[in-house]
Amino acid sequence: MAGHRIFATSFASIYPLYVTKVERKSHTRDEVDEVITWLTGYSDAGLREAIDTGIDLETFFAQAPAMNPNATLITGVICGHRVEEIEDPLMQRIRYMDKLVDEVARGKKMTSILRS
């Protein structure tokens, strides 16, 4: 999947979609921020900077301070693909983020979402 167009999509363009998705289900922006910071190691200030600068997803993940080692515990289907079977590491990280946001929207307990 090298060069997939999602890689060039700005984080700032998908972040509000995540927030809208969870808010429709009576959840909050803070919950979205919590799962993204857990996954990537970004601080709240780092997330805001990524949004303000408009970096693409490839750069967002390349500059992530510390991908959570428990991210490999994220399993399931997103967009018709099992996240644990996605071969491209960048695409897998993007789908991990999608999966976490989906779990927030579905009302799953945060301790379960964060694989604690």
Image: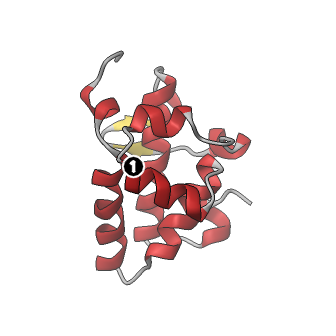
Of the pair 75 and 55, the residue shown nearer to us? 55
Q: What's the image's color scheme?
A: secondary structure
Badge count: 1
Q: Position of residue 76 (x, y in %)?
A: 48, 45
Q: Residue furthest top?
A: 2
Residue at x 59% of width, y 41% of height: 64
Residue at x 48% of width, y 61% of height: 48
> In which image quadrant can residue 113 be found?
bottom right
* Amino acid bearing label 1: Thr
88 in relation to 47, above or below? above
Q: Where is residue 101 in the image (x, y as percent from the top left)?
A: 44, 60
Q: What element carries label 1?
A: helix
Q: Which residue position holds label 1?
A: 53
Of the pair 26 and 5, the residue shown nearer to us? 5
Is residue 46 rendered to the left or right of residue 13?
right
Residue at x 57% of width, y 62% of height: 45
The N terminus sits in image quarter: top left
> In which image quadrant can residue 3 be found?
top left
Residue at x 47% of width, y 62% of height: 103
> Is the residue marked by circle 1 packed among few (<14), some (14-19), or many (20+) residues within 10 Å?
few
Is residue 45 rendered to the left or right of residue 1?
right
The C terminus sits in image quarter: bottom right
Q: Position of residue 14 (x, y in %)?
A: 31, 53
